[in-house]
């Protein structure tokens, strides 16, 4: 599916978010889809994941070859084997890139500039930015601000002092993906926004503590939802964590609220946990016409944190822990 990007015609005219949720700019869907951003180049020597169309870097938008993304080649991680070594290396690289890009976040910088930093850092390590070309996604990371729940496309919007911003990045290295994200606070974020971000970070930690061999995948969502409710927030159920390794997205699917997903964790399971918490009771999102950006129906803010974990013989290792 081709998902277009955005050209900004009316130069960032904002309204404020609902006052009961605090003080912050609301991102409206006031962008016109008239052109597509140039794809950032990278050396041909860097291996691409199989899902990237062969003509992704040369064809006009809408002319990319279709790719059948299958899970058939997904491999379970063999503890102690080469796969474990490689997935740990990829996850560690992703962690390091996120840490470095986080240092750049300040009022006035654009999400497009942050995306360029992500792209350049990943490429400098000899890795491929996994989102680039995934279902024809045009950028190397996603940047989700304030009322954007997930999958915001980097653009020329400068960050405001009151913003919260999630950066979600994944890289592909030596045949394996490393995936992580965090929400960052700009210097004038209000108390309600700070509370949301801290509660989301705690919810992720609670979900990780539910991981070990023999526990049910659905236990993760139960623990996360209970943690969010204790702090007065709701959990968006439209996005899930996912298995990851030599394939970007695969089972198990990790839901972050109460669910009936079958299955138990076993040693070698490698997956992400990435809860999105939302202010208020309505956690649902609606999709912009760009086909990617999901914003809250209520206009409330959302925050997200993500770690990639590996279930071991007697517990769990957090591969992207800073």
Image: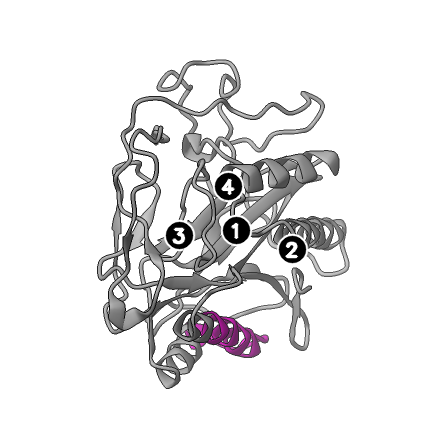
Q: CA distance from mark 4 to mark 3?
A: 17 Å
The residue at 65%/76% (across/down) is 315
Closer to us: 40 or 81:
40
The residue at 73%/35% (across/down) is 124
- The residue carrying pointer 1 sits among few (fewer than 14), some (14 to 19) or many (20 or more) residues within 10 Å by Cα, namely some
Secondary structure beneath label 4: loop
Point out the stretch of residues depicted in magenta: 197-220
Q: Nearer the viewer, mark 2 or mark 4?
A: 4
Q: Earlier in the sequence, mark 4 or mark 3?
A: 4
**Predominant SS of the magenta segment:** helix
Mark identifier at residue 251: none
Q: CA distance from mark 2 to mark 4?
A: 38 Å
Residue linked to disc 3? 150
Is residue 209 found inside the magenta-colored segment of the image? yes
Residue linked to disc 1? 107
The residue at 56%/47% (across/down) is 169
How far across and how far down the image is residue 128, in percent? Answer: 63, 35
- The residue carrying pointer 4 sits among few (fewer than 14), some (14 to 19) or many (20 or more) residues within 10 Å by Cα, namely some
How far across and how far down the image is residue 211, in percent? Answer: 56, 74
């Amino acid at each position: 599916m081709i998902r277009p990007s955005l050209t900004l015609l009316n130069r960032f005219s904002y309204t404020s978010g609902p006052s009961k949720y605090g003080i912050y700019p609301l991102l409206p869907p006031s962008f016109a889809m008239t052109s597509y951003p140039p794809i950032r180049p990278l050396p041909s020597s860097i291996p691409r994941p199989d899902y990237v169309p062969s003509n992704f870097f040369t064809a006009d938008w809408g002319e990319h070859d279709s790719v059948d993304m299958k899970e058939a080649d997904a491999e379970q991680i063999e503890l102690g084997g080469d796969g474990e070594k490689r997935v740990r290396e990829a996850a560690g690289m992703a962690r390091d890139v996120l840490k470095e890009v986080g240092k750049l976040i300040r009022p006035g910088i654009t999400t497009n500039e942050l995306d360029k930093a992500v792209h350049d850092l990943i490429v400098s390590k000899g890795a491929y930015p996994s989102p680039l070309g995934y279902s024809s996604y045009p950028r190397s990371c996603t940047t989700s601000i304030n009322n954007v729940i997930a999958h915001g496309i980097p653009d020329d919007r400068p960050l405001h002092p009151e913003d919260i911003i999630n950066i979600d990045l994944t890289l592909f290295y030596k045949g394996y993906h490393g995936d992580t994200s965090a929400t960052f606070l700009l210097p004038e974020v209000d108390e309600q926004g700070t509370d949301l971000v801290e509660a989301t970070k705690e919810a992720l930690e609670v979900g990780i503590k539910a991981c070990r061999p023999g526990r049910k995948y659905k236990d993760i969502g139960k623990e996360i939802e209970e943690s969010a409710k204790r702090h007065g927030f709701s959990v968006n159920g439209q996005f899930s964590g996912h298995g990851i390794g030599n394939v970007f997205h695969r089972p198990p699917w990790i839901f972050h609220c109460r669910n009936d997903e079958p299955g138990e964790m076993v040693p070698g399971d490698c997956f992400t946990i990435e809860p999105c918490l939302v202010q208020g009771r309505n956690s649902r999102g609606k999709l912009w016409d760009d086909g990617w950006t999901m914003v809250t129906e209520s206009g409330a803010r959302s925050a997200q944190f993500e770690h990639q974990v590996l279930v071991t013989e007697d517990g769990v290792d957090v591969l992207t822990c800073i």
